[in-house]
């Protein structure tokens, strides 16, 4: 690799983007992906990791890597290198407007490029592109209508709660709301909560998360709802923190979710005293998805699986099973 493209102690950059682009070009040549770390800011919103010169400087450098590097043929598919081009995005938008599914659109572009590995992005990248494109093009009237509705509800009943999270460009990302009846239900039935984000039927592919529980008649009750920008640890932290704020700081004793690692990390950070359990429905779905081919006529695998889930309570007995 050319010496000018290699990092050195004392090297300075005028901006965060300049530093990131340099590191990303270096990573492409060597075979590793890069990402921006979270910023640390003081109470006045100043980035404390910057020096007084307002520049970025290389203060420490370790050239050796403790992980396997990507080969050059696959380097373009590393996370920091993947990108949906303008023309690819426009083609995806046209296909979406024509009713072609995201999966079909992605596969079609792969065929045109001679294989999915040649287009330079994954299906999830394309989904994020389309979602971001729609959100950036959100008309004020649409966002304003939602906020006006929330304010109208709050005027009718001051107990109505809503919160919106904005990004650095003042665009709405995550949204949470709960009306007075939801908050009242949580007061009586909020010891055990289930949080589910499997509802993704909206056109923007935004996950709709719902906090639910049971009342004294074993009927479903809703404690709150959220529209998420994505399913990252930071988004989940905001949602769970906002939910706890809405219910006046009262943490549920138990919360059930699916087997999402980001969700689990957020719960551990925001609600450390709450027991986190996995929803049996999602466990059964994953069982059939990953082990269904082992389940055949005459097999007792399903019976043994159900026994492990519902009948065994001792950890040692579970291991022996």
Image: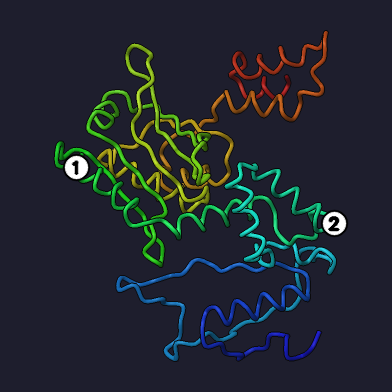
Q: Which of the labelled discs sits on residue 114, or is there none?
A: 2
For marks 1 and 2, give the one nearer the viewer: 2
Please report the residue visible at 77 percent of the width from the left and 90 percent of the height from the top: 3
- Asked if residue 252 lies left or right of residue 288, the reply is left
Quadrant location of the N terminus?
A: bottom right
Nearer to me, 18 or 155: 155
Dividing the picture into quadrants, the one containing residue 63 is bottom right
In the picture, measured across the screen, residue 212 lies left or right of residue 154, that is: right
Give the vertical position of 87 relative to 141 (above or below).
below
Q: Position of residue 313 (x, y in %)?
A: 58, 18
Residue lying at 40% horizontally and 67% vertically, measured from the top left: 169
| C-alpha separation, residue under disc 1 versus residue under disc 2 | 54 Å
Secondary structure of the residue carrying tag 2 is: loop
In this view, which residue lies farthest toward the top?
298
Figure label count:
2
Mark 1, Cα crowd under 10 Å, few <14 / some 14-19 / many 20+, is few
Ranked by sequence position, the earlier of labels 1 and 2 is 2
Residue 307: x %, y % from top left: 66, 14
Residue 12's place in the image compared with 135, above or below, is: below
Relative to 282, does residue 163 appear above or below in the rendering? below
| Residue at 54% across, 27% down | 279
Residue 133 locus on image (x, y percent): 51, 58
Question: Which label sits on residue 152?
Answer: 1
How crowded pointer 2 is (Cα within 10 Å; few <14, some 14-19, many 20+) is rated as: few
């Amino acid at each position: 690799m050319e010496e000018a493209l290699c990092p050195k102690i004392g090297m300075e950059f005028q901006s965060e983007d300049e530093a990131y682009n340099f590191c990303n070009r270096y990573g492409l040549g060597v075979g590793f992906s890069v990402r921006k770390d979270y910023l640390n800011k003081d109470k006045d919103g100043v980035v404390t990791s910057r020096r007084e010169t307002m520049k970025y400087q290389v203060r420490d450098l370790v050239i050796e890597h403790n992980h396997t590097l990507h080969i050059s043929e696959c380097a373009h598919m590393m996370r920091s290198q993947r990108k949906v081009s303008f023309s690819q995005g426009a083609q995806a938008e046209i296909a979406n407007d024509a009713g072609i599914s995201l999966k079909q659109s992605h596969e079609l572009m792969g065929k045109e490029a001679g294989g999915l590995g040649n287009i330079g992005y994954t299906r999830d990248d394309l989904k994020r592109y389309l979602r971001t494109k729609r959100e950036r093009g959100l008309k004020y009237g649409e966002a304003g209508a939602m906020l006006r509705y929330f304010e109208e509800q709050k005027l009718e009943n001051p107990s109505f709660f809503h919160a919106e999270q904005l990004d650095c460009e003042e665009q709405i990302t995550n949204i949470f709301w709960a009306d007075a009846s939801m908050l009242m239900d949580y007061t009586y039935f909020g010891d055990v909560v289930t949080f589910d984000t499997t509802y993704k039927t909206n056109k923007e592919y935004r996950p709709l998360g719902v906090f639910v529980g049971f009342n004294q008649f074993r009927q479903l009750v809703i404690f709150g709802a959220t529209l998420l920008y994505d399913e990252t640890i930071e988004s989940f932290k905001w949602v769970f923190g906002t939910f706890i704020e809405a219910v006046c700081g009262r943490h549920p004793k138990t919360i059930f979710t699916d087997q999402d690692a980001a969700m689990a990390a957020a719960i551990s950070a925001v609600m450390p005293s709450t027991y986190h359990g996995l929803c049996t429905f999602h466990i059964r779905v994953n069982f059939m998805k990953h082990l269904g081919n082992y389940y055949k006529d005459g097999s007792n695998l399903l019976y043994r699986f159900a026994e492990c889930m519902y009948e065994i309570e001792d950890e040692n007995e579970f291991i022996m099973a």
